Amino acid sequence: MGMKNTAVRLAARSVRTSKGRWLALFLIVMLSVGFFAGLKVCRGQMWMACQQYLKAQNFYDYRLYTSLGFTDDAIDALRDRMRSKGVGVQSLEGVKSTDATGAYKDGKGAAQSGVFLLMSMPKKVNQPSLVAGRMPRSDDECVVDDRAAGSSIVGRTITFSDGSGDAVSGLKNRTYTVVGTVNSPLYLNDDRGSSELGSGKRTGFVYLPKADFTSPRYTEVDVTLKRTENQAVYSDAYVNTVKAKKNKIKAALASAAADDYEGLLQNMMKQAPITRDAAVAVAVNQGIDAPSTTVLTRAENNGYASFKNDTSIIDGIANVFPVFFILIALLVCVTTMTRMVEEERTQIGTLKALGCSDFSITMKYMIYAGSAALLGWAVGFFGGTWGLPKIFWWAYRTLYDFAPIPYVFSLPMALLTLGASLAAVVLSIWISCRGELLSAPAVLIRPKAAKPGKRIWIEKIRPLWRRLPFLRKVTLRNMFRYKTRMIMMLIGVGSCTPNKALLERINGTDGVTGVTNLADTRADVSSSVSCLNYIIWLLVLFSGALSFIVIFNLTNINLAERSREIATVEVLGFYPKETRAYALWENLVISILAGFIGLPGGWLFTRFVLSRVLLDNMTFPFIIHGISYLLALICTVIFAAVVNLFMGRAIGRIDMSESLKAVE
């Protein structure tokens, strides 16, 4: 118990005396865990928001079409045939729809017009969600697409025509009072589809009472299955269930449509004494051919498919970026603890001489680093899994704004990140302590001999070396004298540079085409890609924070190791500005070198990232403009300069008398 208390007290004392080092460990774990966990759960939380919304609105599993349309009798026959084939139908409902031009006045009284899809108000399937106002209660009332018109249209009237100014065929009224605005599960994003009216692009949709449609036939039938009610959207289980029933539904639809067509022919034959062939000829003359059928699933719905693709981009990025963050976090942990153990060799030797076991000594460092890792994990995990999905949801608000995003606690992700954090700490402590603990107490108590000065290869270039000022010579010698620290900084900072290079590449995707065959494809894709800019800026922000922490931590270690050296140059008469340059100038040099080293890595990394975010209907061309490389270098140098600004004050607080005391 006494040894354990000693380890705790020593760890607490180390936290107090080396707050910067402990803070660096805390921040790197927090940043890595938050970034990794937040990105990995982001798609799941966005899909959960979609799942809850579609379940609440009873979104269809299948949408059925025939060239004849559907009568009430045909819908009943279709339901019976589907059940006879073993299709577990939850709901089946016909929808009447037509395109029309709508004229109305906006909230400022300005005249507006657009092409709207008029749909009958559903009772069970694809129910619209009310945003403002109320639902229709009489035949002359309607609700309008909230994204198209906004809540200011509530209380105003809207007049529909067929595009040429005439009344819409098959519609009872021409003018309706808008009593509310709604969202529809049929349109998760801002794409409302195409039309033969106007410019060919729909402005929005309008729901009318079913009684306002005078046509006896429905244009489509929506179907939901019993088995899919509790299955997650986009899951393999859902896709397999829908796929397994599709052929049976096709057969049932074809059979019901054939019977409906046969019924039309029989009615013609009853009205006039003609043969069946003659009835077929009459039907063809009336534009009624043998029926063709179409069965669509959710996967063919533009909004549903686009939501999956857009969120999959985030998941593709999540499979790449956090890995680098975790590796750099491990690198920083190992470096930090190795330096700390080397600095405290005398204390370790004293503890061993007093009879402390290797385990007790190791426990001190476990508590020191473990407390930083555990607290960093807690803040990073809960902050990342709560905050990052909300940021991404906010970024996509211009495309998807149908429901709030829920918080979903992922136990597997929590255990994975906690285990990785603790494993990184244990591994770094083991690497740091194993060499020192094998030494005898007498060896540990004696100070470690300083590394001897060596000539560096640049000194062999005499014309160049003679022209360098003294401080630059010192900087170059220190860089090559402490090769491990330089390599750590090159790797840590250089690994942050590729992430920044992605910003300009995403901005250069205006030429992407081919998502659909709509006339406004490029505008739609540009709108989708523009949302990624927020994501890229977030990645740049995290990369910058990582770069800042790496430079801060290594600079803090550098000053702690060289406090005696810095105090010496102060005693020799260096001015404060010269002392800061003596100690910190190499940060800028190494950061610039790391930036240049990271640029080729950025090129390769960008190709790798793009290969991980390939989608079925969207491809990103590999384009990196020269300005991107320049911006990445500038950002890296700025981060190093900011760290130098902070650490310059720390140099002024170094106690010369304490630092210059004999180590013995």
Image (cartoon, grey):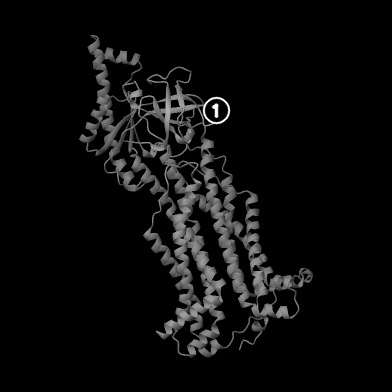
Which SS class for mark 1? loop
Q: Is residue 138 left or right of residue 200?
A: left
Picture coordinates of residue 233, whole percent (x, y):
36, 45
Q: Residue furthest front?
A: 155
In the picture of the structure, the residue carrying the numbered disc 1 is: 110
| Residue situated furthest top in the rendering | 273
Establish if 501 lies above or below 134: below
Q: Quadrant of the C terminus?
A: bottom right
Q: Who's the residue at 46% across and 45% down the image?
A: 310
Q: In which quadrant of the rendered image does the N terminus lie? A: bottom left
Is residue 516 visible in the rendered structure shown here? no
Determine which quarter of the picture holds residue 293.
top left
From the viewer's side, name the closer residue of 413 and 389: 389
> What amino acid is found at the position of numbered circle 1 in the picture?
Ala
Q: Position of residue 419 (x, y in %)?
A: 41, 67
Q: Residue 338, position in %: x, y? A: 53, 76
